[in-house]
Image (cartoon, rainbow, N blue to C red):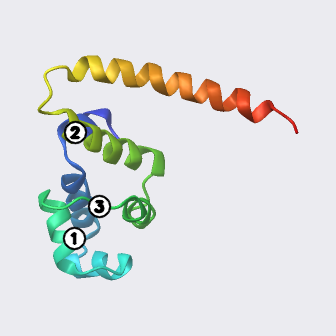
Amino acid sequence: MDKMIVSRSTFGEWMRECREKVGWPLRKVAAQLDIDTSVIAKIEKGQRRATRLQVEQLAILFNEPLSDVLVLYLSEQVAYKLADESCSDEVLRAAEEKIKYLRAKNVKQGEIKF
Protein backbone atom coordinates (compact mmCIF):
# COMPACT_ATOMS: atom_id res chain seq x y z
CA MET A 1 0.00 0.00 0.00
CA ASP A 2 1.33 3.39 -0.98
CA LYS A 3 2.22 5.72 1.92
CA MET A 4 0.31 8.49 0.11
CA ILE A 5 -2.84 6.38 0.36
CA VAL A 6 -2.35 5.93 4.10
CA SER A 7 -1.98 9.64 4.72
CA ARG A 8 -4.70 10.82 2.34
CA SER A 9 -7.50 8.32 2.53
CA THR A 10 -9.70 6.82 5.16
CA PHE A 11 -10.10 3.13 5.75
CA GLY A 12 -13.58 3.32 4.23
CA GLU A 13 -12.29 5.07 1.11
CA TRP A 14 -9.63 2.37 0.71
CA MET A 15 -12.25 -0.30 1.13
CA ARG A 16 -14.54 1.23 -1.48
CA GLU A 17 -11.64 1.63 -3.89
CA CYS A 18 -10.69 -2.05 -3.50
CA ARG A 19 -14.28 -3.19 -3.87
CA GLU A 20 -14.82 -1.12 -7.01
CA LYS A 21 -11.48 -2.25 -8.46
CA VAL A 22 -12.65 -5.87 -8.39
CA GLY A 23 -16.15 -4.87 -9.52
CA TRP A 24 -18.04 -6.22 -6.53
CA PRO A 25 -21.30 -4.81 -5.22
CA LEU A 26 -21.66 -4.06 -1.52
CA ARG A 27 -23.71 -7.23 -1.04
CA LYS A 28 -20.84 -9.47 -2.16
CA VAL A 29 -18.40 -7.98 0.37
CA ALA A 30 -21.10 -8.11 3.04
CA ALA A 31 -21.73 -11.79 2.30
CA GLN A 32 -18.00 -12.58 2.52
CA LEU A 33 -17.81 -10.90 5.95
CA ASP A 34 -21.20 -12.28 7.04
CA ILE A 35 -22.54 -8.82 7.90
CA ASP A 36 -25.34 -6.64 6.62
CA THR A 37 -24.85 -4.60 3.46
CA SER A 38 -25.72 -1.42 5.33
CA VAL A 39 -22.75 -1.99 7.66
CA ILE A 40 -20.38 -2.12 4.67
CA ALA A 41 -21.92 1.06 3.28
CA LYS A 42 -21.50 2.83 6.63
CA ILE A 43 -17.86 1.75 6.94
CA GLU A 44 -17.16 3.04 3.43
CA LYS A 45 -18.82 6.38 4.27
CA GLY A 46 -16.93 6.69 7.56
CA GLN A 47 -20.11 6.47 9.62
CA ARG A 48 -19.01 3.26 11.31
CA ARG A 49 -15.67 1.66 12.20
CA ALA A 50 -14.67 -1.80 11.07
CA THR A 51 -13.66 -4.30 13.72
CA ARG A 52 -10.19 -5.82 13.83
CA LEU A 53 -11.60 -9.14 12.59
CA GLN A 54 -13.30 -7.40 9.66
CA VAL A 55 -10.03 -5.66 8.81
CA GLU A 56 -8.23 -8.99 8.73
CA GLN A 57 -10.97 -10.50 6.57
CA LEU A 58 -10.86 -7.54 4.16
CA ALA A 59 -7.09 -7.84 3.76
CA ILE A 60 -7.54 -11.46 2.71
CA LEU A 61 -10.56 -10.69 0.54
CA PHE A 62 -8.78 -7.92 -1.38
CA ASN A 63 -5.44 -9.76 -1.41
CA GLU A 64 -3.61 -6.98 0.41
CA PRO A 65 -0.81 -7.50 2.95
CA LEU A 66 -2.35 -7.51 6.42
CA SER A 67 0.44 -5.31 7.77
CA ASP A 68 -0.38 -2.58 5.22
CA VAL A 69 -4.10 -2.72 5.94
CA LEU A 70 -3.45 -2.62 9.68
CA VAL A 71 -1.29 0.48 9.26
CA LEU A 72 -4.18 2.23 7.53
CA TYR A 73 -6.74 1.00 10.06
CA LEU A 74 -4.75 1.61 13.24
CA SER A 75 -3.37 4.96 12.14
CA GLU A 76 -6.93 6.10 11.50
CA GLN A 77 -7.96 4.94 14.98
CA VAL A 78 -5.15 6.99 16.51
CA ALA A 79 -5.88 9.98 14.27
CA TYR A 80 -9.55 10.08 15.31
CA LYS A 81 -8.57 9.92 18.99
CA LEU A 82 -6.04 12.75 18.67
CA ALA A 83 -7.56 14.99 15.99
CA ASP A 84 -9.05 17.45 18.46
CA GLU A 85 -6.12 17.49 20.88
CA SER A 86 -3.73 20.41 20.75
CA CYS A 87 -0.81 18.27 21.94
CA SER A 88 -1.24 15.43 19.42
CA ASP A 89 2.37 15.56 18.15
CA GLU A 90 3.65 15.32 21.69
CA VAL A 91 1.33 12.43 22.47
CA LEU A 92 2.52 10.54 19.38
CA ARG A 93 6.17 10.97 20.35
CA ALA A 94 5.44 9.83 23.91
CA ALA A 95 3.45 6.84 22.63
CA GLU A 96 6.34 5.81 20.39
CA GLU A 97 8.70 5.84 23.38
CA LYS A 98 6.17 3.95 25.50
CA ILE A 99 5.85 1.26 22.80
CA LYS A 100 9.63 0.81 22.76
CA TYR A 101 9.66 0.55 26.55
CA LEU A 102 6.83 -1.99 26.65
CA ARG A 103 8.39 -4.13 23.93
CA ALA A 104 11.75 -4.13 25.72
CA LYS A 105 10.07 -4.98 29.01
CA ASN A 106 8.16 -7.88 27.43
CA VAL A 107 11.34 -9.27 25.86
CA LYS A 108 13.14 -9.23 29.21
CA GLN A 109 10.20 -10.91 30.94
CA GLY A 110 10.07 -13.51 28.18
CA GLU A 111 13.65 -14.53 28.98
CA ILE A 112 12.86 -15.39 32.59
CA LYS A 113 12.76 -19.15 33.10
CA PHE A 114 10.92 -20.77 35.96
Indicate which disc, 1 or 2, sits on the residue closer to the N terminus: 1
Q: Residue at x 28, y 44 (%)?
A: 77
Mark 2: give few (<14), some (14-19) or many (20+) Cα within 10 Å: few
For discs 1 and 2, the disc positioned in front in the rendered view: 2
Q: Residue at x 62, y 24 (%)?
A: 104
| Residue matched to label 3 | 50
For discs 3 and 1, the disc positioned in front in the rendered view: 3
Q: Is residue 82 or residue 7 the one in the foreground?
A: 82
Labelled pair 2, 3 in contact (Cβ < 8 Å)? no
- Marks 2 and 3 sit apart, C-alpha to C-alpha, by 15 Å
| Residue matched to label 1 | 40
Indicate which disc, 3 or 1, sits on the residue closer to the N terminus: 1
Q: Residue at x 22, y 57 (%)?
A: 17
Picture quarter with the N terminus? top left
Label 3 is placed on what type of residue?
Ala
What x and y, as percent, mark residue 59? Answer: 41, 59
Label 1 is placed on what type of residue?
Ile
| Residue matched to label 2 | 81
Q: Quadrant of residue 22?
A: bottom left
Per the image, label 3 sits on a secondary structure element best described as loop
Indicate which disc, 2 or 3, sits on the residue closer to the N terminus: 3
